[in-house]
C-alpha cells in the first residue's frame, strides 16, 4: 500500500533542538590548529549559531512539502520516497539513490531538468531520514536493491534506469544485478576502482596517481568509516544526543569532499543535518557501513560513469572496464562527491546523455 506523506516536525522537537544548541558544551582547541585535529572550532561555532538563530526549518519544510511525498512498507520497513511524473507520458522511469551522509535532498536541484525526460522516483534509504530507523540487521546495499525493485514494481514501472553516488552507486548497481530484465542501465557518479596487480594493464601516469590515492585510503581507513563499519551503535549515542556532534560529523564530510569552486550552501547542508537529527537516524544510517560487505552480485547491465575531480577517489577506466559493461564515461573539471548538489547542471546532462544513448 502506498500512502501520501507530509513532512510535519512537531514543534517540541524544534524547541528541543534550539535548547540543546544553546547549551552546547564546547571543547577547547590548540592555537593554530587548522584542520590538523579535525573540524575547526570557530567554523563549527559559526554553523551552530546559524542553525540556532538564523536557519528556518519551517521555511525549508514548506519548500520540501511542495514535492509529492509517499511512503510504503517493504519487508516490514517504512520506505519514504518522492515520486514525480514527467509531462512526457512515455518517459523512462529513473530511480535516484543518495548516499551517506546525504539524503533525498541531494537531488532537489536536478528534479526540474531530469523530469523533462524521466519519471523520477527518489527514495530515502532504509535507516535514513523519513524512512526512519531500521529495526533489524541485514539492510545491506543488496537488500535495499531488492526493496527498490519491489518499489518500482508497485509503482507500475516495468523498465527503468537507476542512478546514484556514494552508497547510491552501490545500490544502483546492485539493482541492475537483481533486476536485470527491468533495469535498462545504471549511471553512477562514484565508482571506486581498487588496485589489481594481476590485471596486466599498462596505466597512464594519471591513472597510477589515482590508484596511489586509493592505496593511501586503504592503508589509512577514514575514522568515520572505521567507526560506522565496526561500532555504529557506539558513535550513534553521541550523535543522537548532541546536535553539535551530529553537525560536526556531517559538516566535516561536506567540507572535505566538495570542490571549493562549487560549495554546498550552509542552509542546504543544515537541512540535511536537520533531517538526520529530527528523525534520530544517526545510528541506523551508520549501520549501512556495517551491514554492507564487498562482493555483491556483479552488475551486467550497461553502465555510465561520471568522474568528478574532488570526489573521494577517481575511477580508473581500464580497471572498471574489466568488471562492467561501460557504455559512457565522462571526466569533469569541477565538482566533488555531492555532484547533484554541487554541479546539478553537469550531472543532469550527463545522466540524460547516457540514457539517451541506450
Image (tube, rainbow, N blue to C red):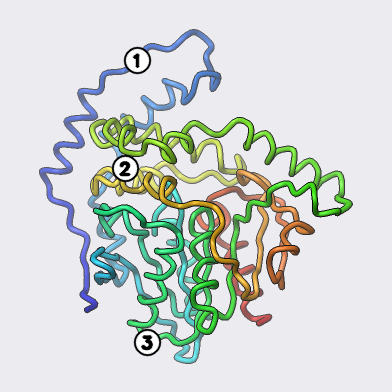
Q: Give how far across and how far down residue 102 sits, in percent.
A: 43, 50
Q: In the rendered image, which quarter contains the C terminus?
A: bottom right
Residue 181 image position (x, y, % from top left): 53, 84
Residue beneath the point at 40% across and 64% down: 144
Q: Residue furthest top?
A: 31
Q: Residue at x 23, y 32 (%)?
A: 241
* Of the pair 11 and 126, the residue shown nearer to us: 126
Q: Which residue bears the numbered disc 2?
A: 282
Question: Helix or strand or loop: what does disc 1 sit on?
Answer: loop
Categorize mark 2 by other alpha carbons within 10 Å: few (<14), some (14-19), many (20+).
Answer: many
Residue 309 x %, y %: 68, 47
Mark 1 / mark 2, whichever is N-terminal: 1
Q: Quarter of the image holding residue 104? A: bottom left
- How dense is the environment of label 1, judged by Cα within 10 Å: few (below 14), some, or many (20 and up)? few
Residue 156, which numbered label? 3
Judged left or right of residue 131, residue 272 is: right
In the drawing, does residue 2 fall left or right of residue 176? left
Q: Residue at x 33, y 58 (%)?
A: 126
Q: Which residue is mark 1?
A: 27
Q: Is residue 100 above or below residue 160?
A: above
Could you say whether the residue bearing mark 3 is in a helix, strand or loop? loop
Q: Residue at x 38, y 11 (%)?
A: 28
**SS type, badge 2:** helix
Task: For label 3, count other residues whose C-alpha is less than 10 Å away and answer few (under 14), some (14-19) or many (20+).
Answer: few
Amino acid at each position: 500500500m502506498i500512502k501520501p506523506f507530509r513532512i510535519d516536525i512537531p514543534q517540541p522537537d524544534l524547541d528541543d533542538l534550539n535548547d540543546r544548541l544553546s547549551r552546547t558544551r564546547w571543547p577547547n582547541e590548540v592555537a593554530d590548529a587548522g584542520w590538523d585535529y579535525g573540524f575547526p572550532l570557530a567554523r563549527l561555532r559559526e554553523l551552530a549559531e546559524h542553525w540556532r538563530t538564523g536557519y528556518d526549518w519551517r521555511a525549508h519544510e514548506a519548500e520540501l512539502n511542495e514535492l509529492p511525498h509517499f511512503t510504503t512498507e517493504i519487508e516490514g520497513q517504512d520506505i519514504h520516497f518522492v515520486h514525480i511524473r514527467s509531462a512526457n507520458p512515455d518517459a523512462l522511469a529513473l530511480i535516484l539513490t543518495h548516499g551517506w551522509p546525504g539524503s533525498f535532498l541531494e537531488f532537489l536541484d536536478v528534479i526540474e531538468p531530469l523530469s523533462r525526460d524521466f519519471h523520477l522516483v527518489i527514495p530515502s534509504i532504509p535507516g535514513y531520514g523519513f524512512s526512519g530507523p531500521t529495526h533489524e540487521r541485514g539492510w545491506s546495499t543488496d537488500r535495499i536493491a531488492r526493496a527498490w525493485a519491489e518499489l518500482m514494481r508497485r509503482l507500475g514501472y516495468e523498465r527503468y534506469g537507476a542512478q546514484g553516488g556514494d552508497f547510491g552507486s552501490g545500490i544502483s548497481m546492485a539493482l541492475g544485478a537483481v533486476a536485470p530484465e527491468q533495469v535498462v542501465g545504471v549511471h553512477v557518479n562514484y565508482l571506486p576502482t581498487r588496485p589489481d596487480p594481476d590485471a596486466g594493464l599498462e596505466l597512464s601516469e594519471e591513472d597510477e596517481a589515482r590508484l596511489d590515492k586509493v592505496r593511501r585510503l586503504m592503508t589509512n581507513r577514514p575514522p568515520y568509516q572505521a567507526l560506522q563499519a565496526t561500532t555504529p551503535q557506539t558513535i550513534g549515542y553521541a550523535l543522537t544526543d548532541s546536535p553539535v556532534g551530529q553537525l560536526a560529523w556531517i559538516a566535516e564530510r561536506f567540507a572535505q569532499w566538495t570542490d571549493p569552486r562549487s560549495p554546498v550552501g550552509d542552509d542546504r547542508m543544515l537541512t540535511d543535518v536537520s533531517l538526520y537529527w529530527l528523525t534520530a537516524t544517526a545510528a541506523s544510517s551508520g549501520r549501512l557501513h556495517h551491514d554492507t560487505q564487498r562482493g555483491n552480485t556483479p552488475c551486467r547491465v550497461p553502465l555510465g560513469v561520471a568522474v568528478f575531480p574532488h570526489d573521494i577517489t577517481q575511477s580508473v577506466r581500464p580497471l572498471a572496464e574489466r568488471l562492467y559493461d561501460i557504455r559512457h564515461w565522462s571526466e569533469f573539471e569541477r565538482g566533488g562527491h555531492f555532484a547533484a548538489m554541487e554541479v546539478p547542471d553537469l550531472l543532469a546532462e550527463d545522466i540524460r546523455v547516457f540514457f539517451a544513448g541506450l
